[in-house]
Amino acid sequence: MAKLKNHRRRTKQDIDNFIAVRLTDEQQKEAAEQLREVRRISQANMTDRDRLISRLLQFRFRIADYIENNHRDKFYSFSYFLKEYISILNIADADFAGHIGISSTLLSRLINQKQHPPKYVMVRLEIHSNKTIPADYWCRLVHKQQLRDLELNEEIRKVQRPFVPKTLDVSFSA
């Protein structure tokens, strides 16, 4: 590979000087208006398929962000994301249940958090989304929800304590 003549390594200062464009308030307003217009035209030219792709990618990134974040939020659950997925598709629950080969009753139980999803449902969701939302994302949502429930459930500890007659003599908790 031939080397370029007079080539010098770019410094951070060179990059900062290139990026740091100073605009007046009026220029900033004009640039913002131009950006809004370009965005409006771009959105107007989107097909329904383009919109679906965009919403699915946003959905995928939202799930990935939540899974990677250490915070366990009661609001975000498998059920929440399943409802959101169905909403993005803009179809009735009964139709969606048919698309993934489960009963409307099972779908209702999943949506209303009356039952944890069986593994085959998570795999079918992956297949339905053409691997846009992998089964392990759905599984990790369930796992994160179970961790939160276990973390907050003091009652189960009270109930299970009598079944453990002997504990260790050491403790690492505060």
Image: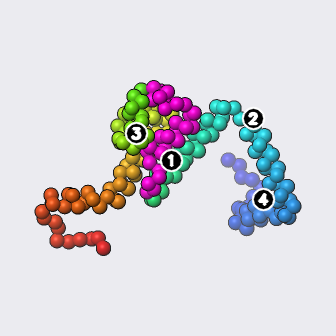
Q: Residue at x 39, y 28 (%)?
A: 103
User: Tag 1, which secondary structure?
Assistant: helix
In magenta, the rendered stretch is 72-99
Q: Residues within 10 Å of mark 4 (few under 14, many from 20)?
A: few
Q: Nearer the viewer, mark 1 or mark 3?
A: 3
**What whole-number distance in Å separates the C-alpha atoms at marks 1 and 3?**
17 Å
Q: Nearer the viewer, mark 4 or mark 1?
A: 1
What numbered label is drawn on residue 99?
none
Seen from this angle, which residue lies furthest bottom? 174
Q: Amino acid type of disc 4?
A: Asn
Which residue was labeled with disc 3? 110
Q: Residues within 10 Å of mark 1 (few under 14, many from 20)?
A: many
Which residue was labeled with disc 1? 63
What numbered label is drawn on residue 6?
4
Q: Residue at x 52, y 36 (%)?
A: 86
Answer yes or no: is residue 123 visible. Answer: no
Which residue was labeled with disc 2? 45
Q: Looking at the image, is 153 positioned above or below residue 132?
A: below
